[in-house]
Image: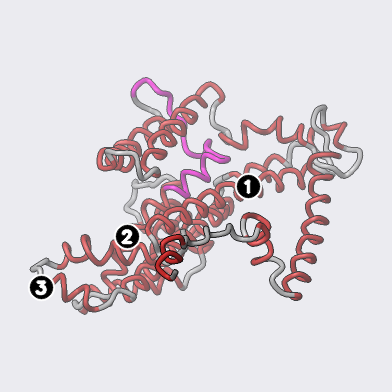
Amino acid sequence: MDTQSQQTWQPIPEKPPPSLSIGPVGWARKNLFSSPLDVVLTLLGLYMTYVVATAILDWAVFGAVWTGTADDCREGSQACWPFIQAKWGQLIYGRYPLEERWRVDATMIIGVLAMIPMLIPAVPFKKWNAIFLFVIYPVLAFFLLLGGSFALPLVETPLWGGLLVTLVTSIVGIVGSLPLGILLALGRRSNMPVVRMLSIGFIEFWRGVPLITVLFMASVMLPLFLPEGVTLDKLLRCLIGIALFSAAYLAEVVRGGLQAIPRGQYEAANALGLGYWRTMGLIILPQALRLVIPGIVNSFIALLKDTTLVLIVGLFDLLGIIQLSFTDPNWSTPNTANTGYFTAAVMFWCLCFSISRYSQFMERRLQTGHKR
């Protein structure tokens, strides 16, 4: 009897989990309504979101003026989108000559096409892509934007403005400051006293000076120390100042990652007979940079937003061009300023949010302690 029961016995199939514990409903119960306090905070947050979102949508979408002239925007207190349509070219190109704006478009398109395969891990030929993006493309962009050769008319940098200046200053600052910050971080941890003291002095000096002071020094004071007859473009001086300023902060971020690497990693590299630079390039830095991705991205986002300070030294970035547009008497309306600032905020938010989301994607891919 027992043998026959064992032969006919079969396990009961597993039942699916309750429908209320999986999917969007399960996620909401776990994260938003798991306790009475969570319920209160969630409802309060939803109410505040509803109030703010309806006010913004009513001002920017439903009650806004979408077509017409400045006269149509003088009535009411809603957004004036005809102002943005009229000034859109200035917001993107500044005072760049109208017939030469194709050069800016070509530079941006080439940069985006070169950056997309670099940011997608599955795309092959990363080495050649990096050589083009970081070596060939900057030279190509320089000749395209500035001109003065290859039958391209010269467009001096004082005519540049808008989103063009914002992207140039932020991208050059990011690309220039990261390798310099890594070198400074390594120098600060060096066993050579002279290298260590010079690195510490550089980092502490630039971290102790506000960026606005750095821009003033680069724009006003630096020409006083140059030899007679030698001049540097104002935009170039600001780019150098921004890169040096950002490098000091990135150096401390990278140093934090270096200090988090266990001593055993260095000992393993020594056991393999690796020298200092091969140890850093192949073993230590890849781990350290992976650990500090959030800090590096945070510095990049702060640098992107800090580029608006170049307005103080006479360079009209995106925000500067918007403020300059307010001086146009033809668009002197009560809603012009709010619409312009709202547009700038949305554009900056889109750029910063894109950087943030990509960094989170890289964190998940590199498994830096985050769940997949």
* Residue at image coords 43%, 58%: 363
Q: Is residue 183 left or right of residue 74?
A: left
Residue that lies at the very extreme toward the left in this rendered image: 273
Question: Magenta stretch containing residue 357, yes or no?
Answer: no
Going by the numbered disc 3, the residue's amino acid type is: Ala
Expressed as whole percent of the image width and height from the top left, the position of residue 338 reads: 77, 47
Residue that lies at the very extreme toward the front in this rendered image: 1
Q: Nearer the viewer, mark 3 or mark 1?
A: 3
Would you call the spot at circle 3 few (<14 residues within 10 Å), some (14-19), or many (20 or more)? few
Q: Is residue 217 visible?
A: no
Tell me: residue 314, above or below residue 207: above
Tell me: residue 129, above or below residue 311: above
Going by the numbered disc 2, the residue's amino acid type is: Leu
Question: Closer to the camera, 64 or 160?
Answer: 64
Q: Earlier in the sequence, mark 2 or mark 1?
A: 2
Expressed as whole percent of the image width and height from the top left, the position of residue 67 reads: 80, 28
| Residue linked to disc 1 | 319
Q: Quadrant of residue 125?
A: top left
CA separation, marks 3 and 1? Answer: 55 Å
Q: Are marks 2 and 3 in contact (CB under 8 Å)?
A: no
**Number of numbered tags placed on the structure image:** 3
| Residue linked to disc 3 | 271
| Render colour scheme | secondary structure
| Residue linked to disc 2 | 180
Q: Secondary structure at mark 2?
A: helix
Question: Closer to the camera, 45 or 285?
Answer: 45
Q: Earlier in the sequence, mark 2 or mark 3?
A: 2
Give the magenta part as a residue range: 150-171
* Residue at image coords 30%, 42%: 130
Tell me: residue 244, above or below residue 35: above
